[in-house]
């Protein structure tokens, strides 16, 4: 292994060899990603979040508005409301793609596939000058074989698309030689924020980066730094200002994206973040759990981080040119700011899911840049046989972890083997009942997002929260995973109370939040109670419970 990377680097940099060999490697990586997407994409590559984006995009195309179905039972008198949780950017992008003739659900998957295909090229051209050809290619391999990217690339969500936007923006900042390139970087950053508001971290990073550039620049060059910053934030402003104005007009606040207070504390969120980040970095779930949830693991992680900081400061920093220093600074700042934003947001608001790979994959590439800078940009006196051997062995181990994770098909399959069969069964049984386009019918299901995506039905999700009961304070869950068989009756009663006079169609199917296989079919006494309360039982067996209620005046 000794000298392997140095030898490869020398061959790459020989005249006439660099570009063809590099591009061949990038093409191979893109083809491998395409094979992963083709063979390992889930049957239904969508989530409840996808339903909101897709519904907004469809409404933008058909009606010129960005309304979508409320997530829960309130308000009962309107099936289409403005979305206070997600920014509108992603829905706009889907609408633009859908204007070419694709439905929004296919547009979301196509955009995810395209983002995964171009991500290797964005990473390489963004960081090749700072890391060198070999370092940049190694970065591409690690990022594209990381659990976060491999897991989210097939999904009709914002994750890999927004990561590509961030990489493009930072790559342009680092390699720009004209003000127009800084303006383009600002546009990419603005779109990233309009797609996911967590990319506020990217805007803060740019502000801090230009402050750093101004401080270290010669006095004669500070005017140029100011022009570059103005160009960048002009690009950001073109995208972000209209978004903020829209939010103020519709919601009365520039940042309306708020939820109930979180029940997960900062310490637990920090450790959960560490677990997700180290899993994404090392491609080793057992290692991640050890580092995050054991005191020896946390201590070892802290010592490692301190040693890396000391190493960068003592040996690496003084050996870097201006471009390499800028790369190290912007990558480190974005990783730190982004991580803090995720932890702070998840500690303040109750988001419905803990921190996971979806949240850390945005920052893993930039942590990898920092780590690779500490190994590929060493002073010559440290590039002896022993140092090169240690570096190469560490790189080989990390590479093997990522390859092993990538080749293990079980890593990309749901632990719940019955999930997709249950999903397909729910749609098959419920589409005639819940996809009906009758006006004023109130539709409810525990698989609502499937019907919203597949047939455009305005189905409410029972797993959501809603105000109910005169003594209820705040938001209360309609169902929880611990609810038993009899809780279905309580939920059905709440649905009836919330709906007012509107006729109701309800579909319960096993396998989604709150409804288990053993809950169905409902018992004879419960059937009698439902009939006594005016419900019509359309179906009641192990595969589903379909109900109708005409309500008053119907």
Image: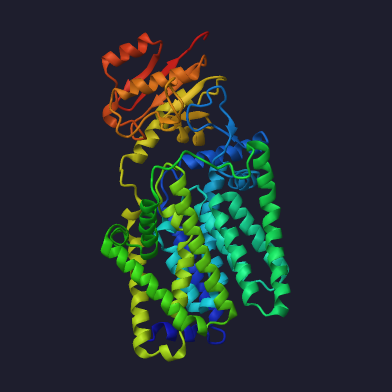
Q: Residue at x 42, y 25 (%)?
A: 472
Indicate whether 311 appears above or below 500: below
Q: How is the image coloured?
A: rainbow
Q: Quadrant of residue 87?
A: top right
The answer to whether any part of residue 152 appears in the image is no
Q: Residue at x 44, y 19 (%)?
A: 470
Image location of residue 452, percent across then percent down: 50, 33
The front one of 207 and 17 is: 207
Image location of residue 65, percent across then percent down: 65, 36
- Assign the N terminus to one quadrant of the image: bottom left
Indicate whether 510 appears above or below 266: above
Q: Is residue 541 left or right of residue 169?
A: left
Indicate whether 310 appears above or below 403: below
Q: Quadrant of residue 250?
A: top right
Indicate whether 191 appears above or below 301: above
The front one of 199 and 519 is: 199
Total marks in image: 0
Q: Residue at x 55, y 40 (%)?
A: 54
Q: Residue at x 32, y 59 (%)?
A: 292
The front one of 14 and 339 is: 339
The answer to whether any part of residue 336 appears in the image is yes
Image location of residue 293, percent across then percent down: 29, 57
Q: Is residue 46 left or right of residue 229?
A: left
Image location of residue 257, percent across then percent down: 55, 42
């Amino acid at each position: 292994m000794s000298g392997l990377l140095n030898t490869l680097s020398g061959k790459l940099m020989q005249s006439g060899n660099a570009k063809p060999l590099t591009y061949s490697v990038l093409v191979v990586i893109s083809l491998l990603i395409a094979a992963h997407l083709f063979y390992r994409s889930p049957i239904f590559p969508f989530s409840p979040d996808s339903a909101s984006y897709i519904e907004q995009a469809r409404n933008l195309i058909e009606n010129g508005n960005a309304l979508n179905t409320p997530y829960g039972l309130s308000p009962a008198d309107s099936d289409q409301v403005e979305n206070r949780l997600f920014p509108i950017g992603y829905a706009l992008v889907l609408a633009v793609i859908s204007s070419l003739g694709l439905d929004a659900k296919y547009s979301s998957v196509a955009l995810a596939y395209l983002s995964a295909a171009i991500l290797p090229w964005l990473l390489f051209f963004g960081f090749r000058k700072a890391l060198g050809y070999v370092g940049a290619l190694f970065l591409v391999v690690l990022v594209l074989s990381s659990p976060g990217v491999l897991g989210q690339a097939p999904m009709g969500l914002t994750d890999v698309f927004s990561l590509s936007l961030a990489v493009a923006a930072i790559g342009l900042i680092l390699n720009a030689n004209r003000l127009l390139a800084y303006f383009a970087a600002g546009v990419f950053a603005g779109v990233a924020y309009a797609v996911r508001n967590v990319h506020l971290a990217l805007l803060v990073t740019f502000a801090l980066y230009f402050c750093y550039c101004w401080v270290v620049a010669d006095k004669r060059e500070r005017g140029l730094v100011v022009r570059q910053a103005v160009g960048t934030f002009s690009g950001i402003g073109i995208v972000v200002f209209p978004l903020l104005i829209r939010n103020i007009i519709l919601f009365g606040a520039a940042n309306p994206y708020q939820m109930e207070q979180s029940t997960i504390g900062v310490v637990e969120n920090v450790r959960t973040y560490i677990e997700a980040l180290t899993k994404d970095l090392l491609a080793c779930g057992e290692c991640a759990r050890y580092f995050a949830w054991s005191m020896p693991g946390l201590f070892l992680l802290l010592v490692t981080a301190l040693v890396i900081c000391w190493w960068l400061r003592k040996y690496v920093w003084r050996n870097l040119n201006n471009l390499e220093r800028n790369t190290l600074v912007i990558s480190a700042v974005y990783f730190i700011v982004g991580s803090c934003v995720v932890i702070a947001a998840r500690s303040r608001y109750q988001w419905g899911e803990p921190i996971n790979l979806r949240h850390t994959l945005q920052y893993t590439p930039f942590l990898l840049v920092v780590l690779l800078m500490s190994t590929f940009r060493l002073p010559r006196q440290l590039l002896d046989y022993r140092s090169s051997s240690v570096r190469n062995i560490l790189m080989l181990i990390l590479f093997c972890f990522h390859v092993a994770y990538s080749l293990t098909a079980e890593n990309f399959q749901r632990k719940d083997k019955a999930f997709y069969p249950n999903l397909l069964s729910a749609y098959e049984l419920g589409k005639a009942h819940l996809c009906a386009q009758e006006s004023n019918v109130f539709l409810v299901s525990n698989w609502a997002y499937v019907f919203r995506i597949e047939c455009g039905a305005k189905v409410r999700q029972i797993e959501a929260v809603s105000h109910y009961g005169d003594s209820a304070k705040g938001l209360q869950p309609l169902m929880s995973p611990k609810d038993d068989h009899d809780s279905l009756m309580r939920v059905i009663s709440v649905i009836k109370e919330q709906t007012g006079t509107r006729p109701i169609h309800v579909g319960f199917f096993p396998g989604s939040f709150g409804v288990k296989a053993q809950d169905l079919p409902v018992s004879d006494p419960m059937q009698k109670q439902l009939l006594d309360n005016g419900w019509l039982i359309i179906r009641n067996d192990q595969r589903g419970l379909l109900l109708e209620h005409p309500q008053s005046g119907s």
